[in-house]
């Protein structure tokens, strides 16, 4: 039954490209880098959110509060600012780790690195905005702890990133 489904899917170019031994090998490497990147990002998020920013509150809260109130028409608590800033810092570090290892190891790409960096950066900005909005929504609006919200959001991002890496960025 599964083999019949796979045969039907292979008739379409998109799926035939995704159902090759090379793609499965890339996916395995992507998952290894993904779990490692996840660990780095999640570790840094927690270190900044629960240790560093608790002892040394980050500056810029008043400016961030004014921007948030202007754009999202909502109050912006110091705790919210703290975990959103921790998220951004962790995400930037993970960005470089993931970009370089995916380029050279997962997808073994030889395409112009600056072109890929521009594309990856655009995806990074989109993902950061989506991740921050989801983190805010899950934590402040629904009431899920930021630690748990972070894991849920990271899981959501992984789903669309592999396809975009394979088909657009590292093709």
Image (cartoon, helix red, strand yellow):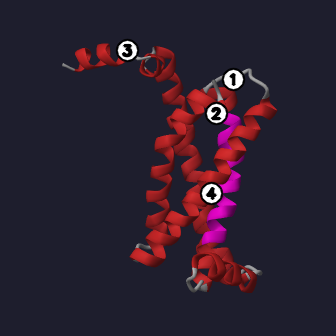
Distance of mark 4 from mark 3, alpha carbons?
34 Å
* Residue 83: percent from left, percent from top: 59, 72
Label 2 or label 4, whichever lies nearer to me, is 4
Residue at coordinates 37% horizontally, 15% vertically from top-left? Answer: 10
In the image, the segment drawn in magenta is: 84-102
* Residue 112: percent from left, percent from top: 79, 26
Q: Is residue 117 shown above or below 154?
A: above
Does label 1 or label 2 sit earlier along the sequence?
Answer: 2
Does label 4 or label 3 sit earlier along the sequence?
Answer: 3
Query: Badge 3 is on which residue?
Result: 10
Label 1 or label 3, whichever lies nearer to me, is 3
User: Which quadrant would residue 152 be assigned to in this image?
Assistant: bottom left
Q: Residues within 10 Å of mark 4 (few under 14, many from 20)?
A: some
Query: Badge 1 is on which residue?
Result: 109
Distance of mark 1 from mark 2, alpha carbons?
9 Å
Magenta span has 167? no
**Front residue of this view, candidates 10 and 102:** 10
SS for dot 1: loop
Q: Is residue 54 shown above or below 7?
A: below
Residue at coordinates 56% horizontally, 44% vertically from top-left? Answer: 36
Quadrant where the C terminus sits is: top right
* Residue 66: percent from left, percent from top: 70, 84
SS for dot 3: helix
Query: Badge 2 is on which residue?
Result: 102
Does label 4 or label 1 sit earlier along the sequence?
Answer: 1
């Amino acid at each position: 039954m599964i083999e019949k489904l796979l045969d039907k899917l292979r008739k379409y170019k998109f799926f035939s490209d995704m159902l090759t031994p090379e793609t499965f090998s890339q996916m395995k490497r992507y998952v290894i880098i993904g779990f490692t990147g996840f660990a780095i990002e999640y570790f840094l998020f927690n270190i900044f959110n629960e240790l560093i920013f608790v002892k040394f509150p980050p500056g810029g809260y008043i400016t961030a509060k004014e921007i948030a109130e202007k754009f999202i028409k909502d109050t912006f608590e110091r705790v919210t600012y703290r975990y959103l800033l921790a998220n951004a810092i962790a995400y930037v570090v993970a960005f470089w780790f993931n970009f370089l290892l995916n380029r050279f190891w997962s997808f073994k790409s030889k395409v112009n690195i600056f072109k890929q960096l521009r594309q990856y950066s655009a995806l990074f900005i989109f993902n950061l905005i989506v991740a921050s909005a989801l983190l805010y929504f899950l934590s402040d609006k629904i009431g899920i702890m930021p630690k748990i919200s972070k894991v849920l959001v990271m899981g959501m991002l992984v789903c669309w990133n592999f396809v975009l890496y394979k088909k657009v960025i590292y093709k």
